[in-house]
Image (tube, helix red, strand yellow):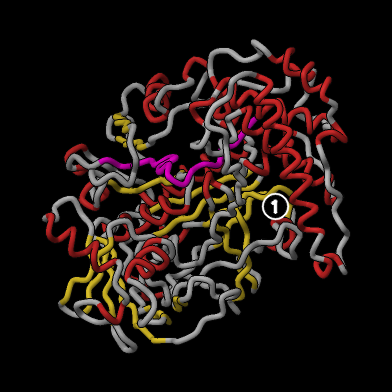
Amino acid sequence: MASEQQLSAIKIDMDTIEVSNLNRQFLFRQSHVGQSKAKVARDAVLKFRPHISITSYHANVKDPEFNVDFFKTFNVVLNGLDNLDARRHVNRLCLAAGVPLVESGTTGFLGQVTVHVKGRTECYECQPKPAPKTYPVCTITSTPSKHKNDEDIEQYGRKIFDHVFGYNIELALSNEDTWKNRNRPRPIYCKDVMPNELIRQNGNQAKGSAHGDLSSVSAMPSLGLKNPQDLWSLKENSAVFLEALKLFFSKREKEIGNLSFDKDDQLAVEFVTAAANIRASSFGIPLHSLFEAKGIAGNIVHAVATTNAIIAGLIVIEAIKVLQNDTKNYRMTYCLEHPSRKMLLMPVEPFEPNKSCYVCSETPLTLEINTHRSKLRDLVDKIVKAKLGMNLPLIMHGSALLYEVGDDLEEDEVANYAANLEKVLSELPSPVAGGTILTIEDLQQELKCSINVKHREEFDEENEPDGMILSGWTQAPAVEKNGATSVDNGASTSGVTEATSLAIEEDDELQIITTQTGKKRKLCDAASSDVSSVPTKIKRKADEVDGNSDVVMLDEGSSENSKKRREP
């Protein structure tokens, strides 16, 4: 690829090393926990390749300094990001800079590596990606202002228990029509499963059970519960629920009212597990162990180091092809859990660009919306940011600027755009109505697209909850856990008619959706004809590099949506 002296690389990563990271890679050690991933990875590589140049950034890849000009200094970008938003951002910057992108992701035994070259292959967004799954998190909204002693906390815990698992169930049962064709749940009250004496005993044992790091506070030791993979009984779940509540009030009272679920918060996981299991018992639903509940609530994707090693090797192979301009041999490679046609690695020729992709083909989009009811804020939040993935959007109607964000705006401009957000579309300074063409642009991503507005009076609240429909942009269908598509039999080689599109969610979660293409989409001859002749070897001289780096590596890029983590 290049001599050691000539190869240079940049690594950008805003994360620090956690204990759960240690089992799925080969560069980090226990002593590195808490340190910058980018810096530790750089230092580890330099130990066995001391003559190459690597610059590490402990930063967010979406920071303004990592702009199009920054990306233009590289010959190839290697992506290992942990969320869809950051991946789309890098895809757009690579398109704007004209730099090839090697995408990758793993989950368990599954993985993939794809190559995206502007004008020659599809971009990362040519195929729709499934939105990350989210689960509603229940919270207790009413809390006492203060407690005088432990007895108050215990009594309050019993009241919460009886209200949530007893009274609320009784209330639900009062609607007879609801239960005509369903199994009726049974109310559960604290006195039926937890005698007063047992609660006091547990409370006394729990004193002094938690010290130091508040996230390590646990209700389990005082109750004699040790194995997180054990299935707790209803009585044990009830005891954990009450003990967890007591510990929150006695050890972490300042956090109450501002608590949010974190899978690394032991007490929070115990509380959620116990509450979910008590509720499940009421409805006759199978219970889950703490280990299982943590995986569900924390959306944990368990990692396999060997899969990551295989994918890392495939990334390097494709990067070498890119640096050698070996376009004819680019491959999208899928790593499977079980052999398909006697193969665990499935190479597929890259697809040509999707002509209807609004990112790389600049195809106009159509938006059906009630222009008399919907505000500009609805358009910005639900369409421009949520669906188009723009971070610093600019919205224009003809020559009229309706909305803009940026640090260089004057105060009166900021106030004017903020006022526009609260106006319905038809009442903006330059009114938006049916037939209006809006231009949406993100200057940071150097992405521009047009939206044709179509006025529509009514929307189905159940099937169209946003009150607007964007056409030309396609959200991938949800993937059913027990659906017909699977890696084993749904994935295809390059010779079959059903192509397999693999999409990455947050934390490298890989999902598989099938798309009917009719025939394999090869790189078109026209796109391939202007590729320069492919050399058998790369002969780089120091003066040919012109200060540019060969490789930029992006890993765990943006954290605002990266709550999912993988566990040992």
The vertical placement of 504 against 24, above or below, is: below
Residue nearest the observer in this picture, 120 or 268: 268
Q: Is 142 situated left or right of 555 in this image?
A: right
Q: Position of residue 92 (x, y in %)?
A: 34, 59
Determine the residue positioned at 22% across, 71% down: 402
Where is 241 relative to 177, above or below? above
Say what amino acid the circle numbered 1 marks: Met
Where residue 549 appears, x then y in whole percent?
Answer: 27, 40
For the residue labelled by badge 1, is the local secondary structure a helix, a strand or a loop? strand
Q: Is residue 17 left or right of residue 405?
A: right
Q: Residues within 10 Å of mark 1 (few under 14, many from 20)?
A: few
- Please provide percent x and percent y for residue 32: 47, 19
Q: Residue furthest top?
A: 208
Answer whether residue 233 is visible to the viewer in this image: no
Q: Residue at x 33, y 74 (%)?
A: 362
Magenta extent: 549-568
Asked if the stretch drawn in magenta spans residue 74, the answer is no
Q: Which residue is mark 1?
A: 343
Q: Does 393 sit above or below residue 76?
A: below
The answer to which image quadrant residue 302 occupies is top right
Based on the displayed image, in which of its 4 quarters is residue 266 positioned? top right
